[in-house]
Image (cartoon, helix red, strand yellow):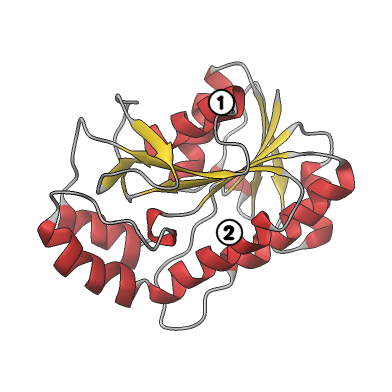
Amino acid sequence: MRIAVFGANGPTGRHLTDQAIAAGHEVVAVTRRPGSLPARPGLTVAVADATDLAAVDAAVSGTNAVLSALGARFSKETVTTYSASAAAITAAMTRHGITRLLAVSSSIADPQWRPSGAHFFNHVLDPLVNRRLGRTLHDDMRRMEAVIRKTHLDWTLVRPSGLFEHPIVTDYRTAETSADGVFTARSDLAASMLRELEEQRYLRKAMGVITTAVKPNIAKLIWNEGVKKK
C-alpha cells in the first residue's frame, strides 16, 4: 500500500514511517523539513505545509491512504495546526478519491475519559496540564475531529493518552472512543494505526490506544510533550 504520512519527521511520524516501511508499505513522507529524512528504499519525501491545500493535494496524489501524526506544542495563543491541516487533507483526499484516513487526536477529546485508579492524574495532572496548559491545543484537536467527522471518508480518530518514547512495540490495548489508561508509547501508537489500517475495526469511530507494559517518567513526559515539543 502507498501511504502518505503527515508529520513524518516528528516523533510519532518517525515510528510510523519506520514501521510502515518494515511492513512492506511505500511511504510518502510529508514534511516541511525534507533534510531530516534520509533517503532509503520505500520512502518518497514530499515537501509541503499541511495547511497549504495545493501542496497537500500534490503530496497525497497517487496514495491509497493518509495517516496524520501532526503535532503542536502547548501555547497560550489559539492553535490551528490540527483543524487547518484536517481541512486541507480531507479536501485533497476527496478530490483524489482517497477514502482511508487515520488522524492522531487525544484521549482528552473524549469528555468522559477518566483513567481508573489514577487519582493523582485525574485530580492534579489532568486539570493542570491538559485542561489548563494544553487547553488551546486540545480545543483545536476537537475542531479537527469535527472537521473529519463531517466528511464522507473512511476515517479513524486515533486517541492516545500521554505520549512517551519507547523503542519497541509492546502489548498495547485499543478501545472504542478512548482507552482506560494514562500513557501511550509512540511505538504502540504507530503500530495500532498500521494495524487499524489493515483491520478496519474502527471505521468512522474514535480508537483509544494505551500502553500498560511500561510507564514513562512523568516530569520528562510533560517537558518533552508540552514545553519542548516542536
| Relative image position of residue 209 (x, y in whole percent) | 38, 40
State the residue position of label 2: 145
- Of the numbered discs in the image, which one, if any, rests on residue 20? 1
Q: Quadrant of the N terminus?
A: top right
The residue type indicated by label 2 comes to Glu
- Of the numbered discs in the image, which one, if any, rests on residue 129? none
Give the mark count: 2
Front residue (pair 141, 12): 141
| Relative image position of residue 14 (x, y in whole percent) | 49, 38
Q: Marks 1 and 2, Cα distance to the nearest angstrom?
A: 24 Å
Vertical arrangement, residue 2 with respect to residue 162, above or below:
above
Mark 1 Cα-neighbour bin, 10 Å: few <14, some 14–19, many ≥20 = many
The residue type indicated by label 1 comes to Ala
Q: For numbered disc 2, what is the local secondary structure?
A: helix
- Report the residue at 76% width, 63% height from top: 52
Nearer to us of marks 1 and 2 is: 2
Q: For numbered disc 1, what is the local secondary structure?
A: helix
